[in-house]
Amino acid sequence: MSIFGKIKDAIFGGDAAARPVPRLAPVPAPTAQAPHPAPIALAVPPAPATAAPSAPPQTAQQRLIELAAFKGNPELNWQSSIVDLMKLLDLDSSLANRKELATELGYTGPKDGSAEMNIWLHKAVMRQLGADTAG
């Protein structure tokens, strides 16, 4: 799997479904309810039930904010650092992986781990995530 694919899976699930991103709000336990009485026939049939609108899908930015809050790593500057973004997602941020990511995303400069390369990588990843979440 590509490095960018691993980034997407770490944010949105995909192959990483075995390790989903935890939600911040706890899910309440189901409560026992008394059985409903037998229905009473009505003279007028009830209106058909309408499905509740589904929540819009979360953006990459929302998922990353949620993950950062859950992990409680304030020293990670994932908003501007490709290394910190990869660390937040528990991915290998080594130069070898960043070189591979640079190749995947079409970086044409020297793949030496320079600040220029890392800044470009971060912007390219965030741009790709935005394009992927736009639908």
Image (cartoon, rainbow, N blue to C red):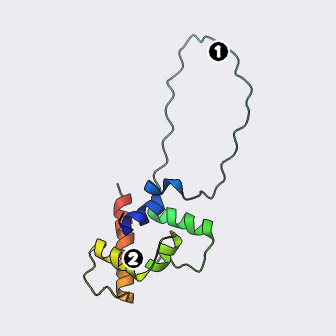
- Please indicate whether residue 57 sits to the left or right of residue 114 in the image: right
State the residue at coordinates (51%, 38%): 52
User: What residue sits right under mark 1 in the picture?
Assistant: 39
Mark 1 surroundings within 10 Å by alpha-carbon count, few (fewer than 14), some (14 through 19), many (20 or more):
few
Q: Where is the C terminus found, in terms of image quarters?
A: bottom left
Q: In this view, does 112 lie above or below 42?
A: below
Mark 2 neighbour class, 10 Å CA radius: few under 14, some 14 to 19, many 20 or more: some
State the SS at label 1: loop
Tell me the SS state at disc 2. Answer: helix
Split into 4 quadrants, where in the image is the N terminus?
Answer: bottom left
Asked if one can make out residue 81 in the rendered structure from this viewpoint, the answer is: no
Location of residue 73 in the rendering, given as x and y in whole percent from the top left corner: 61, 75
Task: Choose mark 2 or mark 1, whichever is in front.
Answer: 2
The front one of 23 and 130 is: 23
Q: Position of residue 132 (x, y in %)?
A: 35, 60
Q: Residue 97 carries which label?
A: 2
Where residue 121 sits, quadrant-wise, is bottom left
Query: Mark 2 or mark 1: which comes first in sequence?
Result: 1
Tag 2: amino acid: Asn
Q: Which amino acid does label 1 sit on?
A: Pro
Residue 130: give x, y in percent of width and height.
38, 64
Q: Is residue 85 shown to the viewer in this render?
A: yes
Query: Which residue is rendered at x = 50% and y = 78% of the image?
Result: 84
Q: In this view, does 131 lie above or below 94?
A: above
- Give the residue drawn at x 42%, y 64%: 6
Total number of numbered labels? 2
Percent coordinates x, y for residue 103 in the rendering = 29, 75
Res 43 quadrant in image: top right
